[in-house]
Image (cartoon, rainbow, N blue to C red):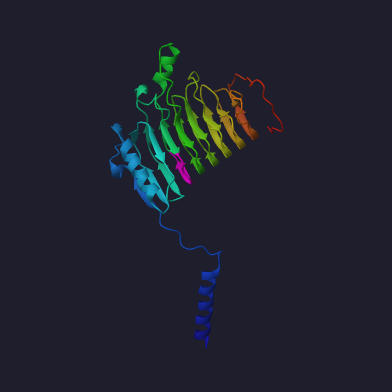
Amino acid sequence: MATALALSMLTIYFAAAALSPSIPAASAAVKKYSVSSYGAKPDGKTDSTNAFLTAWNKACSSPSPSTVHVPAGRFYLKNVAFQGPCKTKSIMFRIDGTLVAPSDYSVIAKVGNWILFRHVNGVIVSGGTLDGQGASLWSCKAAGKSCPTGARQNLEFSNSQNVQINGLTSVNSQLFHIMTNGCQNVKVKGVEVTAAGNSPNTDGIHVQSSAGVTILNSRIGTGDDCISIGPGTTNLWIENISCRPGHGISIGSLGKQLHEAGVQNVTVKTITFTGTGLARGSPGGYCSSTPL
C-alpha cells in the first residue's frame, strides 16, 4: 500500500511538473567558440580579424546560447563588424585578453569604426581590454597635419537591444571609446575608460538615438567628455561614475538639424568629478525636470 501510494504521489508530481509553467525545462547547453580554434594568434601582430568573424558567425548561426571566447594574449584586429540578427538571443562575448588596433592609424581611420556590433539582440561583452592605439593620430592632429578623422569608436552597438557591457577596459581610442546608437535596453557596468588628458574627441561613453540605457559603477578619464549624450536619447540612467580628467557629462551638439530628436528623462546620480572643465550649452535648448 505504501509503495502504491508513493508511486501515485510521484506520478502526480511529474504530471504537475509537466503542466506547471513555474518549473522551467532544463536549459540548453551553451556552445563555446574560441577564436583560437579558427586561427587567431595572441601575439599582437598576426591579423586575427577573419578568425574573430568566423567564431562570431558560428555563434550567431547557432540556435543555442553561445559564447565567443577570446583567451589571454594580445589579438590584432582591423575594423570588424559583428552582424546580426542571430538565431540565438543569448551570446556571451568573453574577452580574457586584449584586442589591439593597428598601430598605423590610417588602416582603420577612414572606415568609420573599429569594433561594431549591428542588429544584435541579447549580446553580453564581458571583461578584457580594447586598445585603440590612437596616440599617433592625436599627435598628427596636434601638429596640424592633414590627418584622417579617425575610427569613430573602439566599440559600438548599433540598432541593437538587450545588450550588456560588463567589466570592459577601453584605452587610447582614436575618437570615442564606447557608443550606443539606435539601441534599446543597454546596461554598461564596471567599465574603465582611459585616454590622455590632451587627446582630442576621445569621449568615454557616447549615447545617441537610444532608449533605456543604464551606466553604472565605472571610471572614465579622457581628453573629452566622460559621458556625452546626443540627440534622440531617452530614459538614460547614470550612477556611481568617477570622471577624471575630462569635460564631465554633457548633453550637447543638439539642434544642428531642423527636425532633430531631443533628449528626455536623464538621471545623473552619485558622480565624482576631478580635474574636469569646459562647460558649455547648446544654443536654443530647453531643460525640464532633470534630476541631479
Residue placed farthest to the right in the image?
Answer: 289
Q: Is residue 167 above or below residue 254?
A: below
Residue placed farthest to the front in the image?
Answer: 258
- Does 123 lie within the magenta span? yes
Question: Is 138 in front, or is 64?
Answer: 64
Q: Would you identify the image quadrant in which residue 142 lies?
A: top left
Residue appearing at x 49%, y 18% in the figure: 198
Question: Is 62 in front, or is 143?
Answer: 62
Residue placed farthest to the top in the image?
Answer: 144
Q: Is residue 125 above or below residue 17?
A: above
Q: Would you identify the image quadrant in which residue 117 lies?
A: top left
The quadrant of the image that shows the C terminus is top right
Residue appearing at x 55%, y 68% in the figure: 20
- Does 267 lie within the magenta span? no
Does residue 132 appear to the left or right of 279 in the view shown?
Answer: left
Q: Is residue 51 above or below residue 204?
A: below
Residue appearing at x 41%, y 34% in the figure: 115
x and y percentages locating residue 105 in the rendered image = 37, 22
Query: Number of callouts in the render?
Result: 0
Does residue 65 appear to the left or right of 290 in the view shown?
Answer: left
Q: Is residue 26 above or below residue 244?
A: below
x and y percentages locating residue 57 in the rendered image = 36, 45
x and y percentages locating residue 61 in the rendered image = 38, 49
Range shown magenta: 118-127
Q: Would you identify the image quadrant in which residue 132 lies?
A: top left
Residue appearing at x 46%, y 49% in the figure: 90
Does residue 252 appear to the left or right of 114 in the view shown?
Answer: right
x and y percentages locating residue 240 in the rendered image = 60, 35
